[in-house]
Amino acid sequence: MTVPDPRELALRIRLRAVRMVAPRGFGYLGQALSSAEQVAAVFASARPGVDRIVCSPGHYIIGPFAAAAELGLVDVSGYGQNGSAFEAIGTERSPVVDYTCGSLGQGVSAALGFALADRFRGSDARIFTMVSDGELEEGQVWEAALFAAHHRLDRLTVLLDANNSQVDGPVDTITTLEPIAAKWSAFGWRVWDVDGHDVSAVGEHDEHGRGAGPLRLRPVRAHLRGVRHAAAVRPDRQRDCLPEPAGAHHRVHARRVNPGRAIAPGHRRRGADAGA
Ligand SMILES: Cc1ncc(C[n+]2csc(CCOP(=O)(O)OP(=O)(O)O)c2C)c(N)n1
Ligand SMILES: [Mg+2]
């Protein structure tokens, strides 16, 4: 598997997501566009068969699906269709990632379970965990954050898409989450706050996180770009949806914790490797 430059991969994720959603005008395009750079950075960093990818919000699974398709691992042409493994909202059967959940708020808990298991068996596997901001309204996320910090699960990275969007409207009109970085910091995480659409910023910090120091966690801020709004994605409107630097109205945070530990064999990632 050859992983292209993360910038190129992010662009291809955007295009692929448009093609996945366009045929039926259904899918989670906004989530793919919001997280494309994060997903690209994760797929560029994760070692196949060793590291793990958790996509906590099941409706964000389109990004990992698109990335895996671009890497030639899977055929996602059935995305969102009845009977397809590539369901529009991830389930326990979803390929490509190690864990995803339709019921929001569980991904960090699953990720720290992986991290603990890997520690027990002496693996240096890293766990990349995508989380959405709406999920931060779930208490379980904060319980998991406490637990991870207490056990210094330093192979765990959380990437938070703080796009200020949830079903009922802008997150900050539903529940105040800010100051997000300070909150995670107070919970014992090392937090970075960078442009989530700047692949080099995400990747750079990823490298800096390797093998150093105590707990690390980090947020990345960015803006949605590539398509103005998902509603425009109909077959006759596809040209309107091609990637372009569009107006910014979303932010992305990424967080990670990942100082080095001893190396040992990892696990086999289901889905992506099976399809390779
Ligand atoms: C526990 C739980 N409560 C409610 C839902 C319904 N739900 C699905 S997506 C979503 C919005 C969550 O916010 P976020 O993921 O930040 O939304 P987005 O950024 O994609 O707009 C909600 C409430 C759910 N899937 N699980
Ligand atoms: Mg959101």
Image: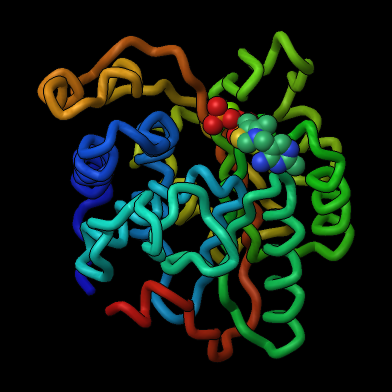
The reply to whether residue 219 is visible in this rendering is: no
The answer to whether residue 173 is left or right of residue 95 is right
13 shown above or below 227 = below
Ligand 1's quadrant = top right
258 shown above or below 204 = below
* Quadrant including the C terminus: bottom left
* Quadrant including the N terminus: bottom left
The reply to whether residue 166 is visible in this rendering is: yes
User: In the image, residue 201 lies at what x, y percent?
Assistant: 41, 38
Query: Depth check: 3 or 271 in front?
Result: 271
Residue drawn at (70%, 13%), measured in percent from left and top? 172
Query: Depth check: 116 or 224 in front?
Result: 224
User: In the image, residue 49 lies at what x, y percent?
Assistant: 44, 81
Residue drawn at (15%, 20%), measured in percent from left and top? 237
Q: Quadrant of residue 209?
A: bottom right
Residue drawn at (36%, 79%), measured in percent from left and top? 273
Residue drawn at (23%, 56%), measured in percent from left and top? 77
Query: Depth check: 211 or 94 in front?
Result: 94
